[in-house]
Image (cartoon, coloured by chain):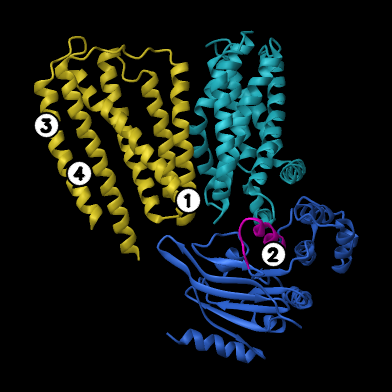
Chain colours: A cyan, B blue, C yellow
Amino acid sequence: MRYLSIIFLVLKKELKDEFRRKEGIVASFFFALISLVLFHFSFDSGVGDISQSGAGLLWLIILFAGTLFIGASFKKEEENGTFYALLLAPVDRGAIYLAKFLSNLILLTLLEVFLLFISYFFLNIPIFNSPLSICFVFLLVSIGFSSLGTLISALLINERGSAVLYPLLLYPLLIPLFMGGATLTNEAINSKDIRSDPWLHLIILFDILFLTISTLLFESAVEE
Amino acid sequence: MENEVLVSCENIEKSFGRKRALKEVNLKLYSNKATLLLGHNGAGKTTLCKIVALLSKQTKGNIFFKGKQVEGNVRNKYKKAIGYLSHSTFLYNHFTAYENLSFFSRLYQVKDAEKKIESLLKQFDILKVKDEVVKNFSRGMQQRLSLSRLLISDPMILILDEPFTGLDPDGIRNLTRYLSNLKEGRAILLVTHEIDESVEICDEVSILKNGEVVLTSEFKNKDEVTKLYFDVQEKR
Amino acid sequence: MKIKSFAMITSIIAVILNLFALYMVFFYAPIEIQMGAAQKIFYYHVPSAISSYIMLFVSFLFSIIFLVTKNELADLWAYAGAEVGLVFILCVLISGPIWGRSAWGKWWVWEPRLTTFLILFLMYFSYILLRTFSSEEMKSKRISAILSIIAFLDVPIVNRAIALWGSVVHPKKVALEKEMWQTFIVSFLAVLFLAFSFLLWRVYIGIYKERKNE
C-alpha cells in the first residue's frame, strides 16, 4: 500500500511539475507538428502515398518528440538538487522509478493522441479503421519506450553531454520495439486482425522484460 | 544534557576505482552535539556526508543508528531521521512554498502535516508567500523555505554539507542563527570552510586529511580550531 | 603475472590454430560450386559471429558481477568483453557484404542475420561511446554495466524482430561436405582462441593502465 501511495504521490508531483514548466510538453507537441509537415513535403514529390507508409513515420516522430521530455525527466531534477531530495526520502527507490515511468507514459499517450489526430487531419491517415487495435498497439509500444527511456535518463543524471549521449544510448535498444510498432500500426490501419500477430507477443515480452529489469536496476543506477 | 550516540560510522571505506577516498573512517554523532568536519578540498568531506545520508554506498564498513546496523527495516527509520542540507535548496522551482512542504511531508509520512507546515512557515516568516511559486522567491526566502523543508520531517540527525556556499554575509549570519537553535535533541554534522560561524554552532571538530579522520577534539574558541587545523595540515 | 601468461599461451595457440585454419581454408576445403572462392569467407564469418556473441555474454556476466560486488576487476572484464565483442561484430559486418556481393550481387542486403549484427554494432558502439565520453570514472563504470546488461537482454529480441521483419530469405542451409566441416571446426576454434586472447590481453592492459595511474 505504502509503495502504491508513494508511486501515486510522486506521479502527481511529476505531472504537476511537467504541466507547470510546460517546456517539455510544448516542445514535443510542436516538434511533432513540424515533423509531420516536413515529412509531408519530403514525401509529396510523388514517391508514394503517405497514408500507406505513414505508420513508420508516426513512430519516428513519436520517438524523436518523446525524447524531448523523457530524456529530461531526471535531468530536470538536477535543478536545486531535488534529485537528491528524492533519494534521501525514506521510500523504496523503485517506486520513484515507476512514478517517473508512469508520468512519461501518460505524457507519451497525450502526445500520441495529438499526433494521431493531426495525422488524420493533415495526411488523412485512416486511424479510425480499427481504433481499438491502434490504441492497444500504441499503449504497448509506449510502455516499452517509457520504461527504457526513463531508466537511461536516470543513468545520465549529473553527466556532462547527456543530451548528446541520451539518444545514442537509447535508440539502438529500441529498434525492435519500433519495428514492431510500425508493422502493427500498419496492419491495424489496414484493418487486419493483430491479436495473434507474433509482433504483439514480442512487444509484450519487451515491455515486461525491461520494465522489470529497469525497476530492479534503478537502485544501482542512482546509488553513487 | 545527555549525549546519546545517534550515528556511529565504523571503519568506513570508500574507493572510486583504485583511488581510496575514505580510509577506515570512524565517526560518532551525539544528540545535543554539533560536530564540525574540516578538511582540504578533496579530503573526502562530501563523500562522507553522502555515505552517512545513504546517498552513496560505502565500499567497506558499517553505519549504526542508535546501536542498530542500518539495513533492512532500520534503513527506512534511519532515512526518516536524517535531514540533509547543502547549498542546493532541494526545492521544486515551479511549486509554491506550501506545495513543496506538502510534497515532502507526505514523502516522509509526517503526521499532522497541515499544522506543522503552517507553524514552520510562520517560524521562518514566509507564511505570507506560501502560495507563490518558489522561482519568484529571493535567495533569502528560498533559504528559509529550504530550512523549513529540512525540518518538516523533524529529523534527529542533521547533515549540513557546506550550507553557506553562495550566501551573502547576511544570509550566512541568519543561517548560523537558525542552525544554532536546532541543536537541542539533535545531532549535527557540519561541513564548511566558514570557521567563524561554525564555531558558534559546533562543540567538536573532526579533521579529515586524505580520507582519514586524523583528529577529533572538543574546542572552546576559533583560535583553537584554527590552530588544530593548521597543526594537522603541517604534520606529514 | 598470471593473466599475462594466460594471454601469452592463448595467443600462441590462436596463432598456430589460425595458420592451420588458413591452410585448410585455402588448400584443404573444396571450392563451393555456386559461390566459388568467396564462399571461403564463411569459415571466418560464422566463427566471428559466434565469438562475438560469446564476448558479449562475457561482458553481460561480468557487468552483473560488477554491480553486485563493485569489484574493479569485474568491470575490466566487462569492458574488455564488450570491446572485443565489438571488434568481432565489425568482422562480421565486413566479411558479410563481401560474401553477399557474390551471393546476391549487392554489397548490402538487409538480410536478417546481417541486420542483427548492424544493430548489435550500434548498441555496443554506444556502450564504448559512453565509456569514452563519460565524465566521472566510477559512475561510468556503473552505468555502462547497466547498459551492457540491458543490451545483452535485448539481443534475442532484436534477433526475433529482424527474423519477423526480414523480407530477404537467408541462404538456405547448404549441405557441407566432410572436408568443409572439418575446416569449419578448425577455423571456429582458431577464431575463438583469438577472441579469448584479445580478451585476456585487453584485461591485462586495463590492469596495467590502472597500476600506472596509481
Q: Are discs 2 and 1 located on one and the same chain? A: no
How far separated are the C-alphas under marks 3 and 4?
15 Å
Question: Which chain hosts label 3?
Answer: C
* Amino acid on which the number 3 mark rests in the picture: Phe
Residue at image point 39% right, 13% down = C168
Considering only order in the chain, which callout, 4 or 3, is on the residue closer to the N terminus?
Answer: 4
Residue annotated with mark 3: C20
Badge 1 element? helix
Q: CA distance from mark 3 to mark 2?
A: 67 Å
Asked whether residue A64 appears in the rendered view, the answer is no
What label sits on residue B82 in the rendered view? 2
Q: Are marks 3 and 4 on the same chain?
A: yes
- Which of the 4 image quadrants contains residue A193? top right
What are the residue bounds of the magenta stretch?
B68-83
Type of amino acid at the residue the image marks with label 2: Ile
Taking A147 as reference, is C175 left or right?
left
**Element on which disc 3 rests:** helix
